[in-house]
Amino acid sequence: MSTVRTTAELRAAVAAGRGAGPVGFVPTMGALHAGHESLIRRARSECALVVVSVFVNPTQFDDPADLDAYPRSAERDVAVAAAAGADLVFLPEAGELYPPGDATRVVVRGPLTESLEGAHRGAGHFDGVTTVVARLLNLVGPDRAYFGAKDAQQALVVRRMARDLRLPVEIVTCPTVRDADGLALSSRNARLSPAERERALSLSRALGACAEAIADGRLRHGAEAADAGLRALAAGGAEPEYFAVVDPETLEPAGPLEGELLLACAARVGDVRLIDNLSLTVPQFTDEPEAATREDRAPTAAT
Ligand code: PAF
């Protein structure tokens, strides 16, 4: 396992390792947890060379305080990445990815970036994500890049960007990793006090309760389900930003609750902003609807 800090070193190291089989890439902002480890292990199981980047990308933060507070632990991240199977860790300074005078942005327009996170964090959030991911994909040139389903909208936006730019990379989405009590793993969880962590459970609980109510037919319309989700978030002690029931490909709000659905929410707990989501399939709209969360079935490579 080696670490590199400059784009020149990164290109040279990837060129030296390329050829033995597919190159896998896991972009991260560090503070690695078991969710990141699962992405790196998946890449390890499918690729001959596994590259991980650790870079807290300033252009995707709408709030400077959030950027300052984002946990940073580069030394530990390198050890975690190595243990999970990475061959190469890229630890750039900001100037490596944003050279002086940088004036270029990669932007995906439309409902994919303007809804949910885009509506609440501002359109600039996804512009920052797609800009840095495009630069990283361009530098690494991977065959496969791995993203977590917890950031379902991010994975959709990145997939659309890669498709539109004709990038020769497969975007692989891996299942959300959760603590035993259901809390979705996030680097931000490290900032929760024990009492806040308890309140943070309201996200996964609201999603689960809403999915259950849809499954047993108590909720039959998207707007009604979104209202119930917002109430459940608040009742659990979080400050809701949104709770949405949408089409998992277009992110358009769902009407009658049938077929493939994505339940997505964001809420603040103290100073910490958290997101979570759940995929749900309602096979058909009958008097007694049956439903299954996709997580109940064998994990799929992509959403
Ligand atoms: O999901 C993240 O950690 C970031 O948004 C990413 C993809 C590494 C881009 O900075």
Image: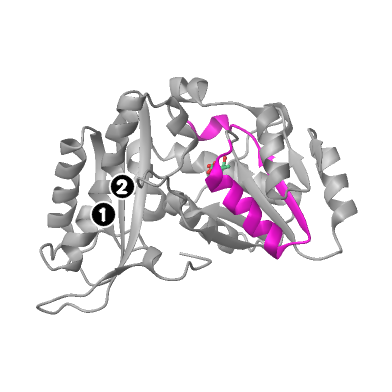
Left or right: residue 159 versus residue 189 is right
Q: CA distance from mark 2 to mark 1?
A: 6 Å
Image coordinates of residue 102 in percent, x first then y, are 66, 32
Residue at the limit of the structure toward the right, as seen here = 16
Left or right: residue 242 versus residue 105 is left
Q: Look at the image and tell me in which quarter the C terminus lies.
A: bottom left
Name the kind of residue labelled 2 in the image: Ser
Q: Residue at x 83, y 50 (%)?
A: 14
Q: Which residues are magenta?
A: 32-61
Residue 128 drawn above or below residue 222 = above
Residue 63 drawn above or below residue 148 = above
SS assignment at label 2 = helix
Left or right: residue 241 versus residue 234 is right
Q: Residue at x 55, y 53 (%)?
A: 147
- Confirm or deny contact between disc 2 and disc 1 (CB under 8 A): yes
Which residue bears the numbered disc 1?
208
Which residue bears the numbered disc 2?
204
Left or right: residue 11 versus residue 231 is right
Q: How is the image coloured?
A: one colour
Residue 115 included in the magenta stretch of the image: no
Residue 172 drawn above or below residue 76 = below
Image coordinates of residue 72 in percent, x first then y, are 59, 26
